[in-house]
Amino acid sequence: MSTVQTLRTFLFYFLLSASAFFWCTLSVFVAPFLPFRARYRFVVQNWCRCATWLAKVVVGIRYEIKGLENIPQRPCVILAKHQSTWETFFLCGFFEPLSQVVKRELLYVPFFGWAMAMLKPIAIDRSNPKAALKQLAKLGHKRLGQGAWVLVFPEGTRIPAGQIGKFSRGGAALAVNANLPVLPIAHNAGEFWPKLGWRKTPGTIQVVIGPLMHASGTGPRAIAELNDRAFAWVSQAQRSIGSLDADAAPCDLSETA
């Protein structure tokens, strides 16, 4: 990485951290007086859009979206590829209101966690997979009923570019039980904002939004079939944008079901 890009990266992290501290602190005092949708826009959507804007203008990470016509009017379950932090910012800023599966410990972080707690996240205990599944099913169904999108990273953790993790069935089960479809999303953000290290590489992220997928029935078999179908589509989409190695086999690195 060049000296100029290194300096740009340091500037990016400084501005991102400063904006996060300012915005989360402000949100703690303002957000409690706002209704949920306005609260989401104020606390999350504006700052996440700021984060993707900073990535664009400071370190040169842009993005293009394909498949906008596939987004339904009614919120559903989003099953997205997980490679970096960028897609979390992007998806939270793009879909609103959105409820995300997060580690319960994050809610205890001063200011940041307090602000997040007001946004109705699905906070799970990753050390207890069975309990996490129940939390996802219960809270996810409730959030969908409240008109929020539910974002699930079915791989469970960030997987480096060129690889793909096995999809857990929690997101598919949530969709089937709520009688809603899943919306698969592929991207190659990890090539420019990798999982490890602080390096940022200029370039254009390809975001591909897939077709809505409905279950062919109910019960465990329908859940498994829907999950497999979503995995197959994401795998193919990753290959089409050059972000999945030809010989890549699914790796089981998930932290939750």
Image (cartoon, rainbow, N blue to C red):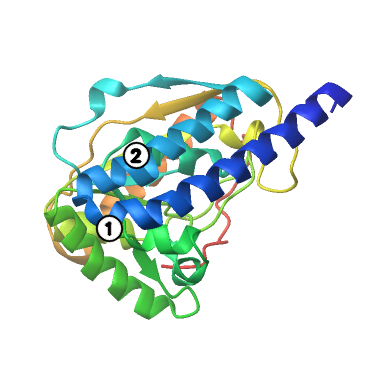
Q: Which residue is mark 2?
A: 184
Q: Which percent across, then down, holds residue 123? A: 38, 67
Mark 1 = which residue? 32
Which quadrant: the C terminus? bottom left
Who's the residue at 61% across and 43% down the image? 18
Residue 55 percent coordinates (x, y) = 59, 29
At label 1, counting other C-alpha atoms closer than 10 Å, the crowd grade (few under 14, some 14-19, many 20 or more) is few
Question: Which of these two is toward me, 242 or 183?
Answer: 183
Q: Residue 66 appears in which quarter of the rendering?
A: top left
Query: Crowdedness of circle 2 by 10 Å Cα count: few (<14), some, many (20+)?
Result: many
Q: Earlier in the sequence, mark 2 or mark 1?
A: 1
Amino acid type shown at disc 1: Pro
In this rendering, which labeled residue sits more in front, label 2 or label 1?
A: 1
Residue 41 occupies which quadrant of the picture?
top left
Q: Could you say where residue 8 lies in the image, as x and y percent from the top left?
A: 75, 27
Q: In this view of the protein, which residue sits in the foreground, 190 or 102?
A: 102
Q: Is residue 35 visible?
A: yes
